[in-house]
Amino acid sequence: MADYVKMWKDLGMDLENHDLLCQVLPTAVGDVFLTQENRPAAMDFWDLVISEVHGIRPAELIEEQKKGRKVFGTFCVYVPDEVIIAADGIVTGLCGGSQFWVPGGEAVLPKSTCPLVKASVGARLGRTCPFFRIADMYVGETTCDGKKKAYEILGEDVPMYVMDVPQMKREKDTLKWKGEIEEFAQKVEEFTGNKVTPEKLGEAIHIVNEKRRALARVYECRKSECLPISGRDALLMMQISFFDDPARCAQMCNRLADELEQRIKDGVSVVPAGTKRILVTGTPLAVPNWKLHNIIETSGAAVVCEEMCTGTRYFENLVSEDGDTLDEQFMDLSRRYMKTNCACFTPNRGRIDDILRMAKEYHADGVIDCSLKFCCLYDTEKYTVSRALKEAGVPVLSIETDYTDADAEQLRTRIGAFVEMLNG
Ligand code: SF4
Ligand code: SF4
C-alpha cells in the first residue's frame, strides 16, 4: 500500500485506531473476494480500489479541494447528486458499514439505533475514516428517525444540510420534493460559489444517467441463466460506485459489462449449472458489509440481484434529459427520485411490485429479505414483502442482522437450510 500516513495525519485522523481498522480489512477482502474462482478480469479495478480504500480516492478528493472544489458527503440515494455536480462539487457516499465504528456511535446514540447510523456517527466522531474527514459539507435527509436525530449530533461537528424527504407519494409530495431540490441547489451554489445553470444541470443529469446506465448493464447480465459474476463482486462494484468519480465509474462498469456480455456468449458462469439464485432485498449494505452475500455464496447459492439502495434503487429510473429550464429540470429530478421505493414511504406498494418484478426478471429461486437490527421501517415491511412473495409462490426467508459476527453461525444454519429447501 502506498504511504498515506501524512495525508491521514493532515486530516486530523486518529492514526492509532485507524491502524487497527487497516489491519482487519485486507484479511476480510482476501477471505470474501480473492478466494473466489473464475472472477471477471475487470474486477481488478475494484480489487485495487478496495485494497487502498482509504488512500486512492481520498487523495484524489484532496487534490480537487486544493483547486477550490467542495466535497459533499451524502448518506442516502434521495440526495440528488446532479445538483452538486452541476455546481462543480464532488459527491461521496458516507454510510458506515463496519462494526469497527459502532461502539463510537453507541457512545452518543442509543444502542437501539441501527448499525448503519451508529457506524456513520462513530466513523466521524472517532476520526478513523478519511471520507468523513474530507467532506466539506454533509447532506442528510429526513428518511428515518435514527438518521434525523444523528444528523443533529453530526451537525455540531461539521456543516450539515438536511433535505426534507416527503413521506408519501402524492403529486403534492413530488412538488414539495421539487421545492426541496431547488432550495438545496441554492445552498450548493452558496457553498461552492458556482451557479447551477440549465446547461450545467443538463450536463450533470447526463453524467449521472450514464453512470446509472452502466450499472444497469452489469445488472442486466446478472439476469442471465449463465451467471457471469458473483453477487459479492457485483456488490463490491455497487458499494464503490458511491465513492467514485461518476464518469470513471461509468467507464469501469461498462468495461465490466463488456466482459460479462462476452462471458454469457461464451457460456462462462461463476457457478455450476443449477445453482439456486437468490434475490436479496432490504436495508443497504454499506462498504465493507459483505457478511450476508458471503454467507449465501458459501452456502451453495448465488446472489443475482439486490433490491436495495446498494443495488437497484441506486440506478433504476433515469432523469429525463429533455428539460431546458431549471424549473423543468428540478421537476424531472423530483419525478425520478420519487420513483425510488424506500420503506420510509407510506403506503409503499411500489416496493412490493419492484420485488415481485425483480424476482421474475432475475429468475430468482428464492428471496432473502434482510433488515439491519433496529431498522423499524424495513423490519415492519417484511410482513407485506413476505406475504406478497408467498402469494406469488416465491420462497422467502426473512432475517435481521447487524455488523457483528455474533450471529454468523446461526445465519449460516438458517440460510443453509433455506438453500437446501430450494434444492428440494
Ligand atoms: S434505505 Fe431509504 S433511507 Fe436508507 S439510503 Fe436507502 S432510501 Fe435512503
Ligand atoms: S437501515 Fe433503516 S434505520 Fe438504518 S438508516 Fe436505513 S432506514 Fe434508517
Image (cartoon, rainbow, N blue to C red):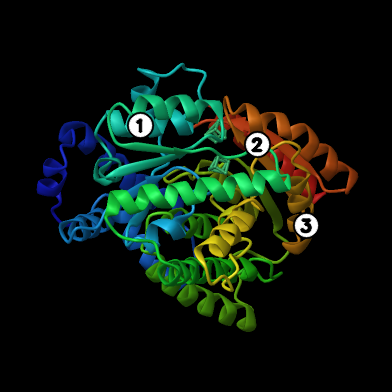
How far apart marks 2 and 1 lie (CA) works out to 32 Å
Mark toward the viewer: 1 or 3: 3
Specify the label residue 357 is tagged with.
3
The residue identified by callout 1 is 100
Report which quarter residue 169 is drawn in: top right
State the residue in front, 53 or 377.
377
| Classed neighbour count for the residue bearing mark 1: other residues with Cα under 10 Å, few (<14), some (14–19), many (≥20) | many
SS label for mark 2: loop
Specify the label residue 319 is tagged with.
none
**Disc 2 or 3, which lies upstream in sequence?**
2
User: In the shown orientation, is residue 172 left or right of residue 404?
Assistant: right
| Classed neighbour count for the residue bearing mark 2: other residues with Cα under 10 Å, few (<14), some (14–19), many (≥20) | some
Q: Mark 3 and mark 2 in contact (Cβ < 8 Å)?
A: no
Mark toward the viewer: 2 or 1: 2
Splitting the image into four quadrants, where does ligand 2 fall?
top right
SS label for mark 3: helix
State the residue in front, 289 or 129.
129
Specify the label residue 167 is tagged with.
2
Quarter of the figure that contains the N terminus? bottom left
**Disc 2 or 1, which lies upstream in sequence?**
1
User: In the shown orientation, is residue 31 left or right of residue 329?
Assistant: left
Q: Position of residue 259 (x, y in %)?
A: 51, 78
Instruction: Report the amino acid beneath label 3.
Output: Arg
Q: Position of residue 61 (x, y in %)?
A: 25, 56
User: In the shown orientation, is residue 387 left or right of residue 188?
Assistant: right
Instruction: Report the amino acid beneath label 2.
Output: Gln
Against 182, is 213 above or below?
Answer: below
